[in-house]
């Protein structure tokens, strides 16, 4: 990959808070126009990593560039080209959609303020709601407004911190269509999420645990490289079956999926041998299935201890 095609190219970034390592040795390359999803348990360092990548937080160690600027020495320049959508709705609830956008355009001292606000309102389908107070909007519309606000100044890099928490599936799908359209126009997107369906919509994902990048790659690569074998079982009294399965050699995890269980392990032969007697049991329906991202993340989250 040529260096100029990279929106982000960082090596060995570290951040400590109060003597505790929150992000350790983060090395990452992100192409322009790529959507990179950050996943990992609460407190694993996703937000801290994203903030370091875009100059909002100075790393204690490490080096690299974001949008061609040095992440340590040129943080101010990076910030100007970044749009940041925070976890919590941070616009003025007692201003209308139009007033909020106009306020942001003023903050950015945009020369063509009126035009930019008009364009944002129409591009995001907010025209008929433009005079509505932001505080009266539903979760999905608030999030659409937040996206309009953070893209108003045409950033080259978009940071989305759990952008669709608490938003219904239709609004989430619409939101992701917009994100893909922005990426197709060359905007690079870093998004932190706990949702598997969102992870699957990213071009690549990075999984953090205790501040360390454990794996990265396309969702398919991450699943393939995990080396998991998964069986699905349906039948009565799954709660009792979970307890029984967890005692068997080779069964590393049992995850409920609706009316079924996913039973996984990394030693396919040992797992198959352990499950053989249960596969004869009346009433249970077994099928070998491809592991999904969720199975892989359950494995990853169980696989490491705390960083000293
Ligand atoms: N400014 C700060 N001062 C002190 N500790 C902090 C600060 N920011 C983050 N932390 C700590 O660093 C750790 C990682 O936090 P971070 O917000 O990066 O995790 P996260 O993966 O984004 O979590 P979540 O999924 O809950 O949003 C947490 O233990 C958090 O309490």
Image (cartoon, helix red, strand yellow):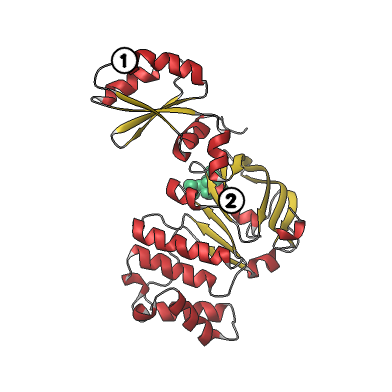
Question: Is the residue 8 above or below the residue 118 in the image?
Answer: above
Residue at screen point 46% across, 51% down: 198
Categorize mark 2 by other alpha carbons within 10 Å: few (<14), some (14-19), many (20+): many
Using the rendered image of the protein, determine whether residue 209 is visible from the camera's viewpoint: no
- Say which mark, if any, is on residue 305: none
Where residue 281 sits in the image (x, y, percent)?
28, 16
**Residue named by callout 1:** 280
Q: Nearer the viewer, residue 140 or 76?
A: 140
Q: Secondary structure at mark 1?
A: loop
Question: Residue at coordinates 37% horizontally, 73% vertically from top-left?
Answer: 134
Question: Is residue 14 visible in the rendered structure shown here?
Answer: yes
The quadrant the C terminus occupies is: top right
Q: Is mark 2 within 8 Å of ligand 1?
A: yes
Residue 238, percent across and down? 28, 26
Residue 123, relative to residue 58: is it above or below?
below
- Name the one closer to the observer, 74 or 28: 28
Label 2 with label 1: CB-CB less than 8 Å: no
Secondary structure of the residue carrying numbered label 2: helix
Q: How many marks?
A: 2
Q: Is residue 36 above or below residue 222?
A: below
Residue at 50% from the left image edge and 17% from the top image edge: 269
Cα gap from disc 2 to disc 1, whole angstroms = 50 Å
Q: Which sits earlier in the primary sequence, circle 2 or circle 1?
A: 2
State whether residue 27 is above or below residue 152.
Answer: above
**Side (left or right) of 236 relative to 245:** left
* Neighbour tally class for label 1: few under 14, some 14-19, many 20 plus, Cα within 10 Å: few
- Residue at the location (44% across, 14% down)? 273
| Ligand 1 within 8 Å of the CB at mark 1 | no
Residue 35 x, y percent position in the rendering: 57, 56
The residue identified by callout 2 is 48
Find residue 155 and report its horizontal and vertical position in percent: 60, 69
Tell me where residue 113 sits by quadrant: bottom right
């Amino acid at each position: 990959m040529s260096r100029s095609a990279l929106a982000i190219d960082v090596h060995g970034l570290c951040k400590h808070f109060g003597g505790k390592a929150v992000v350790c040795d983060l090395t990452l390359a992100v192409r322009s126009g790529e959507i990179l999803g950050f996943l990992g348990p609460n407190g694993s360092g996703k937000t801290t990593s994203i903030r370091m990548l875009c100059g909002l937080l100075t790393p204690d160690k490490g080096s690299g560039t974001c949008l061609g600027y040095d992440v340590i020495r040129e943080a101010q320049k990076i910030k100007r080209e970044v749009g940041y959508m925070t976890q919590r709705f941070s616009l003025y609830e007692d201003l209308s959609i139009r007033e909020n956008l106009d306020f942001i355009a003023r903050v950015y001292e945009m020369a063509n303020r009126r035009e930019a606000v008009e364009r944002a309102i129409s591009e995001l389908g907010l025209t008929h709601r433009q005079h509505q107070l932001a505080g009266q909007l539903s979760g999905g519309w608030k999030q659409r407004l937040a996206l309009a606000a953070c893209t108003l100044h045409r950033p080259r890099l978009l940071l989305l911190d759990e952008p669709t928490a608490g938003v219904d599936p239709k609004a989430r799908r619409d939101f992701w269509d917009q994100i893909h359209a922005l990426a197709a126009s060359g905007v690079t997107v870093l998004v932190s999420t706990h949702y598997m369906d969102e992870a699957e919509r990213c071009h690549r994902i990075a999984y953090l645990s205790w501040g360390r990048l454990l794996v990265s790659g396309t969702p398919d690569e991450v699943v393939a490289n995990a080396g998991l074998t998964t069986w699905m079982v349906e039948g009565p009294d799954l709660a009792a079956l979970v307890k029984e399965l967890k005692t068997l050699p080779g069964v590393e995890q049992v995850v409920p999926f609706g009316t079924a269980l996913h039973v996984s392990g990394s030693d396919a032969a040992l797992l198959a041998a352990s499950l053989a007697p249960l596969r004869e049991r009346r009433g249970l329906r077994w099928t070998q299935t491809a592991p999904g991202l969720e199975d892989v993340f359950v494995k990853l989250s169980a696989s490491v201890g705390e960083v000293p």
